[in-house]
Image: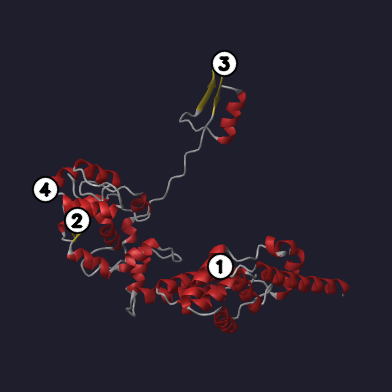
Amino acid sequence: MSLFKILKDIIFGNTEETNSVKNNSEGFTIQVNYPEPPSREIPSLELNLKGIKKSKNGLYPHEILILDYASSYKMNESPNQGFWLYRYGVEDTKVILDKLYRSGFLIEASIKESLSKETVNTLEHILKKYNLKMTGRKNELLERISSEIPENDLKEYVPVRSYALTDLGKEELASNEYVMYIHKKSIDDLDIWSLNKLINKEPKMNYRDKLWGYLNTKGLKYFSKKEFGMYRNIRLQMVNFLIEEEKYVGAIPFLGEVIAIDLNECAMDSFAMDYYIENNLKMIFPYEESIYKLTPNTISLGNEIIQKSNISNEEAKKIMLEYLDKVNLELNIFSKKECIDIFLFEKDGDTDQAKNIYENTIKKYVNKASKNLLK
């Protein structure tokens, strides 16, 4: 082993299991101690369950979530997805699956239901054995197998069945949609435990109404503390929340806030902002190099909302400006109108017009800086 290789291992890390690097020809050994990878903290299921209210049918939130996943598992397996342990503290998912089975939430799936969990390769193998057409999408392969091959002949291909929901299991999931929703979504610091506590507080209402109230309250707290980055993130979550409910026109005012905050420094007073701009013109202007630009995701999201609202750019602009007039955001680079115009120009691919706004704004600040120097 060359000295270069040894030094490389020391600096960049050795991918081999050993912590010792030895050079026999040179007759020396270098001991390289690699740090242990950081261990992930496992949450305490027992602690998380404190203060949690069971469902009408007696299940905790993590049990409802496992019920939702159950149909993707075979009855003899112990699911080992890391999130069960590292997100929810569930060490043995199989124990809970067995409980759900005994309690009547799950049953053994039929042979054809179990086949739907098999791979396309397995389905093609079955079709080939029976000299049946092997082309098509998975649903088409399953349909062909179901219609052409007797169920008893298929037993050998599914020696272990998957789980299937009973009517009770389906009712449980339908009554507790909040569990699956918050598991898949990232909404502030909420999880299945905190949302369970939230929806069980008075006044009782639909979980989505509770979530909306939570987001609005959290946003106002951030606004009052002038934590506009966090406020902006909450507003964006509210935009996406309304899109889920297909309330596209209702999402437009909040989108306007996101746009205005992204294009400004809302937490600085006018004196501090003047100083900041004068000393950081190259970061703000020109348009191509500015750190104050809308992300492609924001532009794409806004385009989707306006299209699905079935309204014109001018109508969307009016809605956003009227709402921004009511919100006391300290916009200190671009005005409200300039922010919305930049968004609309970028949405429509008219970057030249967007550049003009940046150029006119830099002239304004350069002129202001020149006047300050003459004082």
Where 129 sits versus 323, above or below? above
* In this rendering, position of residue 352 left or right of residue 41: right
Q: Residue at x 59, y 31 (%)?
A: 8
Query: Which of the numbered marks, if any, corresponds to residue 299?
Result: 1
Q: Which residue in the rendered view is the most extreme toward the right?
A: 374
Label 1: how many residues lie within 10 Å, few (<14), some (14-19) or many (20+)?
some
Question: Which residue is disc 2 drawn over?
Answer: 99
Label 3 vs 2, first from the N-terminus = 3
- Helix, strand or loop at label 1? It is helix
- Helix, strand or loop at label 2? It is helix
Query: Which of the numbered marks, if any, corresponds to residue 152?
Result: 4
Label 2 vs 1, first from the N-terminus = 2
Q: Position of residue 296 (x, y in %)?
A: 56, 63
Label 3 vs 4, first from the N-terminus = 3
Q: Amino acid at mark 2?
A: Lys
The quadrant of the image that shows the N terminus is top right
Foreground label between 4 and 2: 4
The quadrant of the image that shows the C terminus is bottom right
Q: Give the CA separation, mark 3 to mark 2.
A: 62 Å
- Helix, strand or loop at label 4? It is helix
Label 4 vs 2, first from the N-terminus = 2
- Helix, strand or loop at label 3? It is loop
Where 41 sits versus 217, above or below? above
Q: Residue at x 27, y 55 (%)?
A: 139
